[in-house]
Amino acid sequence: MKQMLLLSLLSCLTTLHTDAYSYLNYRKQPTHTKVHRSAVWATHVTIDLHDCTYSKVRSQHEIERFIKKLCSHLGVTRYDDAEFLYHYSGQGYTSGYTATQQANGHTDIAIRVNEENNNVHIDLFSCVPFDPYIIAHKARKFFFAYDMHYYVSYRK
């Protein structure tokens, strides 16, 4: 009985350590480089979300809802509804959605969902000023991603 209790406690501590370690690594991720806003005419951010919630990744409605929220946050108007394409595994692709959206302000959004790994990859290019750090964390929160990486390029 004591051994089972000890193993259970050890398992909990390992889980806490893993969660704390991933949280610390998440907090240590470098924020974007400070750049003079007058020198930048566009921002390009690529966001990789890993181990997202199953229901969010497999729902076209949820992906479209995220795109609408993203456009609203950026303050841009969508030209049309987002275009969706579904890939089935076996066609040389992993199964999942690809969505694209164009909006005013020279804003382009592309989202690729990999259903096999529950990963979401977002590509956002916009001439409208925005904070990539905030966008990346909003995406992580929306898709309930366990892990996230993002990369920022400023066009000068």
Image (spheres, grey):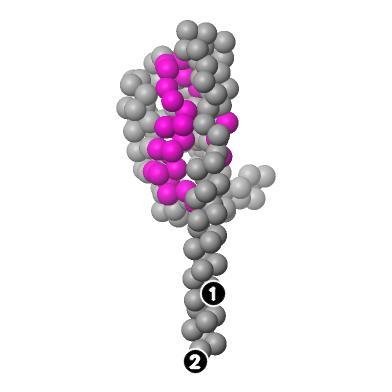
Residue located 55% across and 60% down the image: 18
Residue located 52% across and 8% down the image: 39
Secondary structure category for the residue under label 1: helix
Kindly identify which numbered label has been placed on residue 1.
Answer: 2
Q: Can residue 123 be seen from the camera position used here?
A: no
In the rendered view, tell whether residue 46 sits above or below residue 144: above
User: Which numbered disc, 2 or 1, marks the residue that appears first in the sequence?
Assistant: 2
Q: How crowded is mark 1: few (under 14 residues within 10 Å), some or many (20 or more)?
A: few
Magenta stretch in the rendered image: 125-151
Q: Residue furthest right?
A: 92
In the rendered view, tell whether residue 64 sits above or below residue 143: above
In the rendered view, tell whether residue 148 sits above or below residue 71: below
Verify CB contact (< 8 Å) between mark 2 and mark 1: no
In the rendered view, tell whether residue 43 sits above or below residue 31: above
Figure quadrant of the C terminus: top right
Q: Which amino acid does label 1 sit on?
A: Leu
Kindly identify which numbered label has been placed on residue 10.
Answer: 1
Q: What residue type is labelled 2?
A: Met
Residue located 32% across and 27% down the image: 72
